[in-house]
Amino acid sequence: MTAPSASGRSPRWIGAILLLAATAVICLAVLIINRGPLYYFDTGSYFRQGDAALSLVLPAPEKDSAVVNAGASQPGDRVEEDETTSGSRSMAYALLVAAFWRADALAGVAVVHLALLLLSVWLAMRVLQRTGQTGRSTLQLVTIPLLVAATTSLPFYIAYIMPDIFTSVMLIVIATVVVAGQDMRLTEWLGAVSLAAFAVVLHPSHLGIAVLMVPFVVLAALLRLGPGRWLAAGFAIALVAVALAERKAFEFATETVARKEVIHTPHITARLIVDGPGMAYLDDVCPRDDLATCALHEALSWSDDPYRLTATHIIFEQSERLGSFRLMPVKDQQAVAAEQRDFFLQVLAARPFGTVFALGENAVTQLGMNSVKMTIPNEAVINNAKSLSGLPDAKLEVLDSVLTRDQPWLGAANSVHSVIYLISFVIVVVLLLWPGRVVPSLKLFALFLLIGVAVNALVCGGVSQPAARYGARVMWLLPFAAAFLLLVQRAPGPRPSIGESP
């Protein structure tokens, strides 16, 4: 028997604590190296929207109005008119960012990212322990896959003050419920529902992902027998309902309390136009009084600059040379955005092959984009965050970033990450296809993570616009899944464990 240490703790528990601490530190490595969080140009918009909402119940401290009202210089982050507000940003995440920003502790948002990620992974591994003989402790199943994933994009997204890390949180929870929902206890269900419901409302793309995951969850239920097989399907459908209800509640509160019009961004419409089928359809049918998108078609003709026909410029640009949607009257903007689902169905019916091909091509392009470049601010992004922070000049240095896009390490890091993703994908596929090597229920967990990565690419690349930010936010799930499957392989003989018993 091993004698306990002088502190009363056995070396086993000391090792467990050290392993967990090392995992946390490595996952926060980018935050530590950067001496603060990473930004995107839209981070300032989240602060501005959240700060305005907080001010309704908790007035902000006195600030230099010149700083608070400074305009953004980046496309898509211009100061909104007083009578409108964007419906494409999550109010829940905006409040989280604004609360920490007001406290001059924005790095705390990254700590929240890590804490909720750890909670989702711990919940998954705790539940999966009951579905098969893993031969590993819960601590090992939590920390080792995260340590492997931390060699890729994971630490960047933990430090990133955008809601992208919660895409993976939602996918992990959905995969867990699909595999072991029937075996989950009440407290575990409460944890899963809370994490997934919070994650699904944090970004519009999460609603699209939740919707597209429903058929896969239903298929999994159809292919298995036994009680409780429909729990996961009900869970997935409930997630969609939560996201839709949150959008309606936000619109109602904005219009009745803040007295502002909610403007949604027509991502689907812009994508169809840029890809070709949407523009060809509009060329054929416009002008037409019963099609609001014809107003956008007209706005696109106000300039002959070809660069206006990009999704980003259509949605965000306000200059006369490149702008279109944002130059239209507010009522026309609302009508175009509200019509985008119907517009998609009309274009699909008129040009089914071109539309499906464009969606698939964008999704494949998105799968190949996994650079962390978009998580790293440049000088313009940093200045924009400062201008919207409202912090005194003496404290603005806390918003500076050590990591910038123009550094030689970035290209090397992206190359290393790509190699790891490729090797991880091969490992996952081999272990999924290898009969008897991994318990089927644990294979199903990894399979649903792969499905989630593909669905994320379809939603973000096919509906919005292929971007490295959208790919890298979930690509770390590949090495995570590979490490998990390698850990739970069936092998003869007992395995030593670290931390608690399985």
Image (tube, grey):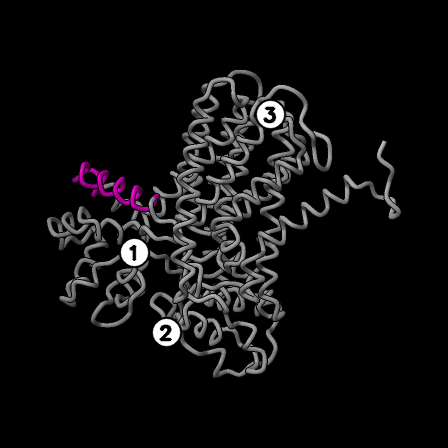
Magenta stretch: give its range: 346-367
Q: Amino acid at mark 1?
A: Ala
**Which residue is drawn at the image coordinates 44% and 62% (left, top)?**
376
User: Of the numbered discs in the image, which one, if any, rests on residue 335?
Assistant: 1
Q: Quadrant of residue 183?
A: top right
Mark 2 element type: loop
Residue 21 picture location, percent across and down: 68, 50
Residue 497 picture location, percent across and down: 70, 32
364 lies above or below 302: above
Viewer-side label of 3, 2: 2
Q: Residue at label 2?
A: 73
**Label 3 to label 1: alpha-carbon separation:** 44 Å
Mark 3 crowdedness (10 Å alpha carbons): few <14, some 14-19, many ≥20: some
Q: Is residue 278 visible?
A: yes
**Label 3 to label 2: alpha-carbon separation:** 51 Å
Marked residue nearer the N-terminal end (3 or 1): 3
Q: Are marks 2 and 1 in contact (CB under 8 Å)?
A: no
Q: Main secondary structure of the magenta part?
A: helix
Q: Quadrant of residue 361?
A: top left
Residue 355 picture location, percent across and down: 21, 41
- Front residue (pair 405, 186): 405
- Front residue (pair 228, 130): 130
Viewer-side label of 2, 1: 2
User: Of the numbered discs in the image, which one, if any, rests on residue 182?
Assistant: 3
